[in-house]
Image (cartoon, rainbow, N blue to C red):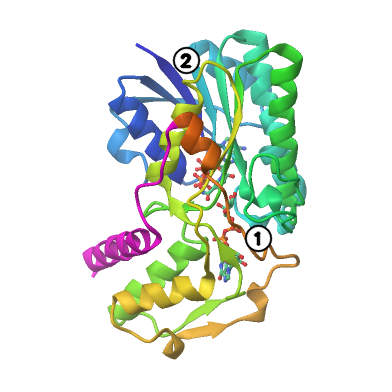
Amino acid sequence: MKKALITGITGQDGSYLAELLLEKGYKVYGLKRRNSTPNYENINHLMDEIEIISGDLLDLPSLINAIKISDPDEVYNLGAQSFVTSSWHQSIYTGQATGIGVTNMLEAIMLTKPETRFYQASSSEMFGKVLEIPQKETTPFYPRSPYAVAKVYGHWITVNYRESYNLYACSGILFNHESPRRGIEFVTRKVTDAVARIKLGLQKELHLGNLDAKRDWGYAGDYVKAMWLMLQQPKPDDYVIATGKTYSVKELVETAFEYVGLDWKTYVVQDSKLIRPAEVDLLLGSPQKAQEKLGWKPQVSFEQLIHMMIESDLKKISATL
Ligand code: NAP
Ligand code: F7E
């Protein structure tokens, strides 16, 4: 039986990846830091099947301990301070958790079980003020937030440990991916939650920032399959994971309101407080290498994704009424 350790198991991707690995017959361990209010919402349904190990990406001994307990064949490093806006408010912490945390995990592997295969959750945010359209594995980075700068560090330290120590380490440069388990602060979920509340008569307005920003949005359930595929190849490498289509925040809003038969212009208020100090205007990824080398293709379209999220939010909110 293969064993995997997932950091960030309580997050959106951690929960989908745990489901996928369990389906494939893995023994799954999840690293979980202590929170004053426990947040097991995404993994409650898996708690009988997975083993939780206490630890924090900032605490090297806890990572060494996690490797010793889990004795993993594969480590998926999904833990991070992942919200771009918060990275301006907590820039040092973001650098530590999202950047240095990667080195901590790599060191824990080097010190304890260097034959472990390692996956790093890199991000399309590294392309920032894009230098090429579409963005691919060879496109230079131009990060536009403390989060993105930390991810660039995490990306290169992963490449560096692969080249320095011959570690089997891969970096997946994933474009935005969403689901009903997406954190409420991210724009897709903020919109689908608000649309459901407005439809149910519980909310009147939706405040948003930049409506012109464009993103390449896919479904998290599809993207975790690419993470697993990367660690099954004969040689470690880095891959862009994207749909190859881009939509503006305005198109997202139109799609979402239209689904419930409402006109978005009646409800959306543009709020300057939600504009970022530096914006990433356009992300559009090329999944060509992932298609050719991993045989990976996204299955869920943008419209299907937004409809799935609205249905889930309508159900969740209705259940509380
Ligand atoms: P998420 O829902 O925000 O989950 C982040 C996870 O990291 C949570 O489980 C969180 O635990 C954990 N974490 C935070 N700080 C930690 C620390 N110091 N030590 C240990 N764990 C810590 O993020 P996601 O959307 O699933 O994304 C997964 C990873 O992919 C992240 O690294 C993210 O930056 C990256 N990424 C995401 C996307 C995307 O579109 N979703 C795209 C590219 C890359 P708590 O529950 O304790 O907070
Ligand atoms: O913003 C605009 C905002 O916060 C998307 C993370 O998973 O994906 C995510 O980062 C766009 C931006 O995601 C609001 O200005 C307008 O242009 O949903 P988001 P993100 O910043 O792209 C990448 C790939 C990651 O790696 C990150 O971890 O939407 N926008 N109005 C808004 N965004 C938010 N959150 N809230 C608004 O009200």
**Observer able to see residue 49:** no
x 35%, y 47%: residue: 299
Query: Is 204 drawn above or below residue 127 in the view shown?
Result: below
**Quadrant position of the C terminus in the picture:** bottom left
Along the viewing direction, whichever of 201 and 283 lies nearer the viewer: 283
Q: Which residues are magenta?
A: 295-321
Give the answer, above or below, for where 31 lies relative to 35.
above
Q: Which residue does the numbered mark 1 point to in the structure image?
A: 85
Ligand 1 sits in which quadrant?
Answer: top right
Position of residue 61 in the picture relative to residue 203 (left or right)? right
In the rendered image, the quadrant that contains the N terminus is top left
Residue 18 point in image, percent of width and height: 38, 32
Residue appearing at x 75%, y 24% in the figure: 160
Badge 1 residue CB within 8 Å of ligand 2: yes
What amino acid type is highlighted by mark number 2? Ser
Classify mark 2: residues with Cα within 10 Å, few (<14), some (14-19) or many (20+): many
Q: Could one spot residue 203 in this view of the protein?
A: yes
- Whole-percent x and y of residue 270? 58, 83
Mark 2, secondary structure of its residue = helix
Q: Is residue 315 magenta?
A: yes
Q: On the image, numbered disc 2 is attached to which residue? A: 70
Magenta segment, prevailing SS (helix, strand or loop)? helix
Q: CA distance from mark 1 to mark 2?
A: 34 Å
Image mark for residue 176: none
Instruction: Say whether marks 1 and 2 touch (CB < 8 Å).
Output: no
Give the left or right position of residue 121, taking residue 300 as reference. right
* Residue 201 on the magenta segment: no
At x 51%, y 53%, the residue is: 244
Question: Given the image, on which type of amino acid does mark 1 rest?
Answer: Thr
